[in-house]
């Protein structure tokens, strides 16, 4: 069953087509990879799905309802949560404080009350949920540590814990493996698979082909804003057009 459908989506900036008639669907509880060279349109697609931008044409269907053009806050409330390429954390706050702030979307409270503890019953529920997310991502031993002091792998795990605290149904992961060493990559792959096994659907934008090929059920390859290929990792890896445009040529950054 398709959880998300991208239908004939185009996005123009002036005379430039960042996306041109893009179509793909994401199955429930799958990890769907969105890959391609830099400038292919991946980030633009994430912005449109998450409501930070509106398409020039086409539609986004989430669980059989159109979310095209809705505000990002409405889309987050519907269950689509996005992480970002740059680690977006409150670096002078602890792991627990970061995740607690992330609960404000799902608990219908605000950031100030999350920090000062007003509305006690709701805040206790938020604290419990924050702890669940921290334990889920294996960060309980670091929960009182300042975010800026965390190693890269733990920072990336914290970003996902913050996203999980908002109770996503569809999680958009934007390059979670960038800059990681092999050990960190293996750990993050295991955590990403754990998130999927918990029932959360994932769209993954990533250049690390080990992670992409090892995690994704299906791939959509973008090139110059158009769909170049779609299929299983094996099908895409053996596609001559993909090899020429992306996998076999140039540097992936």
Image (cartoon, rainbow, N blue to C red):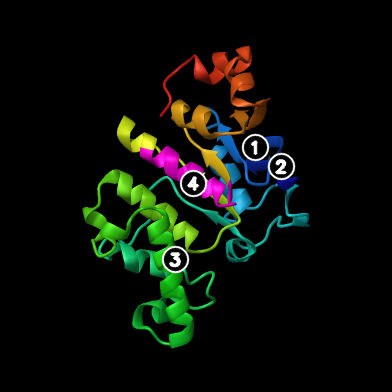
Q: Which residue is mark 2?
A: 9
Residue 136 position within the rendered picture, expressed as x and y whole percent measured from the top left: 42, 56
Q: Give the distance between the C-alpha atoms of the residues marked 2 and 1, in whole angstroms.
A: 7 Å
In the picture shown, does residue 98 fall above or below 193?
Answer: below
Give the image location of residue 54, x and y in percent: 65, 52
Of mark 1 and mark 4, the one earlier in the sequence is: 1
Residue 203 bears which disc, if any?
Answer: none
Foreground of the two, 128 or 89: 128
The label nearer to you, 4 versus 3, is 4
Residue 196 within the magenta-colored segment of the rendering: yes
Q: Residue furthest left?
A: 149
Tags 2 and 1 in contact by the CB under 8 Å rule?
Answer: yes
Q: Where, quadrant-wise, is the N terminus in this rendering?
A: top right
193 is higher (above) or lower (below) than 36: below
Camera-nearest residue between 82 and 18: 82
Q: Nearer the viewer, mark 1 or mark 3?
A: 3
Q: Earlier in the sequence, mark 4 or mark 2?
A: 2
The numbered disc on residue 19 is 1
SS for dot 4:
helix
Lower sequence index among marks 4 and 3:
3
**Residue drawn at 61 percent across, 21 percent down:** 236
Residue 194, numbered circle: 4
The magenta stretch is 187-201
- Which label's residue is closer to the chain start, 2 or 1? 2
Pointer 3 residue: 102
- The Cα–Cα distance between marks 1 and 3, rounded to whole angstroms, is 31 Å
Earlier sequence position, callout 2 versus callout 3: 2
Residue found at x 25% / y 47%: 151
- Taking the spot 50% from the left edge, 78% from the top edge, the residue there is 109
């Amino acid at each position: 069953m398709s959880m998300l459908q991208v239908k004939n989506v185009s996005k123009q900036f002036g005379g430039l087509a960042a996306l041109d008639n893009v179509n793909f669907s994401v199955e429930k509880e799958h990890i769907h990879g969105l890959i391609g060279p830099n400038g292919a349109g991946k980030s633009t697609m994430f912005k449109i799905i998450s409501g930070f931008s509106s398409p020039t044409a086409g539609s986004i269907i989430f669980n059989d309802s159109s979310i095209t053009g809705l505000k990002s806050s409405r889309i987050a409330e519907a269950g689509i949560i996005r992480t970002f390429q740059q680690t977006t954390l409150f670096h002078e706050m602890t792991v627990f404080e970061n995740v607690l702030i992330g609960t404000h979307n799902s608990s219908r409270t605000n950031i100030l009350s999350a920090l000062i503890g007003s509305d006690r019953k709701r805040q206790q529920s938020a604290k419990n949920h924050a702890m669940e997310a921290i334990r889920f991502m294996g960060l309980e031993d670091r929960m009182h540590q300042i975010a800026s002091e965390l190693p890269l792998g733990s920072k990336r795990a914290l970003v996902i814990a913050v996203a999980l605290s908002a109770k996503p149904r569809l999680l958009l992961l934007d390059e979670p493996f960038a800059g990681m060493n092999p050990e960190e990559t293996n750990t993050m792959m295991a955590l990403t698979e754990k998130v999927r096994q918990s029932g959360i659907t994932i769209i993954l934008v990533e250049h690390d082909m080990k992670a992409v090929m090892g995690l994704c059920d299906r791939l959509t390859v973008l090139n110059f804003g158009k769909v170049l290929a779609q299929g299983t990792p094996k099908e895409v890896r053996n596609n001559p057009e993909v090899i020429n445009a992306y996998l076999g040529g140039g540097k992936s950054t």
